């Protein structure tokens, strides 16, 4: 049996060359999991190593070896954030999946702000307050978010916030493509899902390097918006009414 099936929530953490953050991640997540267990939402963590070239894979195995609720999954090669997220969602068998980045610019404690809404909404996500990024990063993010909202009409203020909780059955039906992670709210809404936005905290990066620059923060998302518009018109959404297969 898939070990994540024992939990209500699987927190997916994509990792690419984050060796300097692994032990800090361990401490934050190890401190958080008992609190969510006590609240009746037993959770585990699934680290998805996206073909890291540094010591991240070895450190992930190390921390998973000494923490009962930590699991790891390796991608054969670096495939990008969207692929890492899809791999985590495909591997999860819990009723809900969460997502956070490995850079610790958001904190796992703020999942507690999202979880109270998961019975009512198919997706609950954070809105980063008091952004601690550079002026250029903040402005490019604001421009990209504005253009994406205009193109998708998803009504989401901060799609780039990594803190998200989704119903797993909905998450597994999301059409995935490179750059998909920027469109999670719009893509899940294609299924008639409801999205809740909740303010969460944001912190400066203290270790490692950002994997984003002007090209993949502005130009790439701009082109992806047109791909989304094309796909939206052709998206197949169905639900079965019954069968005699079992």
Image (cartoon, grey):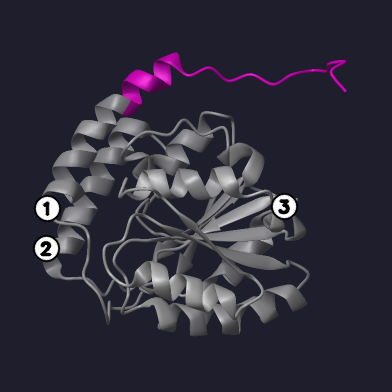
- Mark found first going from the N terminus, 2 or 1: 2
* Residue 2 screen position, x and y as percent: 70, 52
Residue sitting at 68 percent across and 57 percent down? Answer: 4
Q: Is residue 201 visible?
A: no
* Residue 194 screen position, x and y as percent: 58, 41
Q: Which residues are magenta?
A: 228-246
Residue 231 covered by magenta stretch: yes
31 on left or right of 61: right
Numbered circle sitting on residue 119? 3
Residue 32 covered by magenta stretch: no
- Mark found first going from the N terminus, 1 or 3: 3
175 on left or right of 202: right
Mark-to-mark CA distance, 2 and 1: 9 Å
Residue sitting at 56 percent across and 68 percent down? Answer: 111
Examine the rendered structure and indicate whether residue 174 appears above or below residue 162: above
Label pair 2/1, CB-CB below 8 angstroms: yes
* Residue 222 screen position, x and y as percent: 20, 36
152 on left or right of 208: right
Mark-to-mark CA distance, 1 and 3: 37 Å
213 on left or right of 19: left
Q: Which residue is tagged 1?
A: 214
| Quarter occupied by residue 67 | bottom right
Residue sitting at 31 percent across and 40 percent down? Answer: 179
Magenta stretch, overall SS: loop
Quadrant showing the C terminus: top right
| Quarter occupied by residue 40 | bottom right
Examine the rendered structure and indicate whether residue 19 appears above or below residue 235: below
Q: Which SS class for mark 3?
A: loop
């Amino acid at each position: 049996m898939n070990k994540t099936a024992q939990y209500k929530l699987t927190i997916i953490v994509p990792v690419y060359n984050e060796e300097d953050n692994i032990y800090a991640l361990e401490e934050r997540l190890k401190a958080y999991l008992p609190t969510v267990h006590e609240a009746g939402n037993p959770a585990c963590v699934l680290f998805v190593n996206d073909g890291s070239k540094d010591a991240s894979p070895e450190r992930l195995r190390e921390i998973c070896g000494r923490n009962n609720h930590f699991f790891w999954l390796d991608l054969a090669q670096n495939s990008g954030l969207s692929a890492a997220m899809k791999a985590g969602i495909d591997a999860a068998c819990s009723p809900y999946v969460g997502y956070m980045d490995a850079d610790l610019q958001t904190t796992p404690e703020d999942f507690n702000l999202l979880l109270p809404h998961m019975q009512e909404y198919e997706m609950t996500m954070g809105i980063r307050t008091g952004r601690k990024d550079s002026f250029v990063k903040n402005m490019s993010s604001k421009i990209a978010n504005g253009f994406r909202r205009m193109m998708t009409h998803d009504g989401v203020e901060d799609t780039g916030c990594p803190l998200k909780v989704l119903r797993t059955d909905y998450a597994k039906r999301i059409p995935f493509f490179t750059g998909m992670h920027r469109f999670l709210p719009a893509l899940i809404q294609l299924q008639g899902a409801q999205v809740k936005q909740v303010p969460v905290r944001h912190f400066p990066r203290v270790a490692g390097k950002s994997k984003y620059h002007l090209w993949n923060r502005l130009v790439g998302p701009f082109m992806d918006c047109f791909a989304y518009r094309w796909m939206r018109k052709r998206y197949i959404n169905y639900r079965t009414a019954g069968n005699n297969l079992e």
